[in-house]
Amino acid sequence: MATSAAPTYFPAFRLPVDEVRLVDGGVWANNPAMVGVTEAVSMFGRGLGEIRVLSLGTTTSTRARPSKLDNGGLLHWVRGPNVVDVLMAGQSAGAFAQVQHLIGSDNAYRLSPPAPPELARLDRCDARELIGKAAHHSRVFAPRFESVFAAHAATPYKPLHGPNAKAGS
């Protein structure tokens, strides 16, 4: 419930036991690639040379920003989707660039096909068009996926916390 609690569309989710309020992780990590690298190193003891990242986006906007935004000013930025879109895209691009700096651009790939705003609206998307676009971009990306990621076999997951965690881990 929390991962889909986009605050501009859905209410926050409260955990039943301790009433902790949760909202979509995109509020602070719209692209969690850097979070993944950080946890791989700090929590799982992996070296940067061992890490490969496949970052999957939901689409990249092709919307052009009006030139009046170059002049700044609160009114220009508040009108329309400018502020939210720019903040989300900026965080995503910045996080992925950090990942590429740390592990190398040959070890980090992002698949987030471009889509015009009318095609990928969160509240009114065109599912058939998006599926078609995803199929095309998946076919184009498939050889890269095969060469970099397909042979990887993950080690079994062992929880760090909770009732299934191993004692002393």
Image (cartoon, helix red, strand yellow):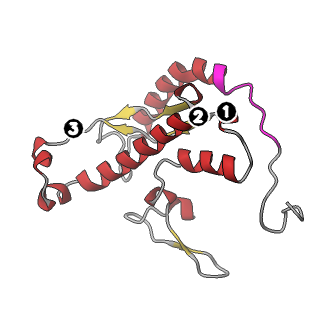
Q: Are marks 3 and 2 in contact (CB under 8 Å)?
A: no
Crowd class of label 1 (few under 14; some 14 to 19; many from 20; radius 10 Å):
few
- Residue nearest the observer in this picture, 143 or 89: 89
- Residue nearest the observer in this picture, 122 or 169: 169
Helix, strand or loop at disc 1? helix
Q: CA–CA distance between discs 1 and 3?
A: 37 Å
Is residue 152 a member of the stretch shown in magenta? yes
x and y percentages locating residue 93 in the rendered image: 41, 41
Helix, strand or loop at disc 3? loop
Task: Give the magenta range.
Answer: 147-155
Amino acid of disc 1? Gly
To which quarter of the image does residue 13 belong?
Answer: bottom right
Q: Which residue is mark 3?
A: 64
Q: Are marks 2 and 1 in contact (CB under 8 Å)?
A: yes
| Image height of 95 relative to 141, above or below | below
Amino acid of disc 3? Ala
To which quarter of the image does residue 17 belong?
Answer: bottom right
Crowd class of label 3 (few under 14; some 14 to 19; many from 20; radius 10 Å):
few
Is residue 158 a member of the stretch shown in magenta? no
Q: Which mark is nearer the camera, 1 or 3?
A: 1
Q: Taken as a whole, is the magenta stretch helix, strand or loop?
A: loop
Q: Which mark is nearer the camera, 3 or 2?
A: 2
x and y percentages locating residue 57 in the rendered image: 48, 40
Indicate left or right for 23 with 103 as reference: left
Q: Which residue is mark 2?
A: 103
- The numbered disc on residue 49 is 1
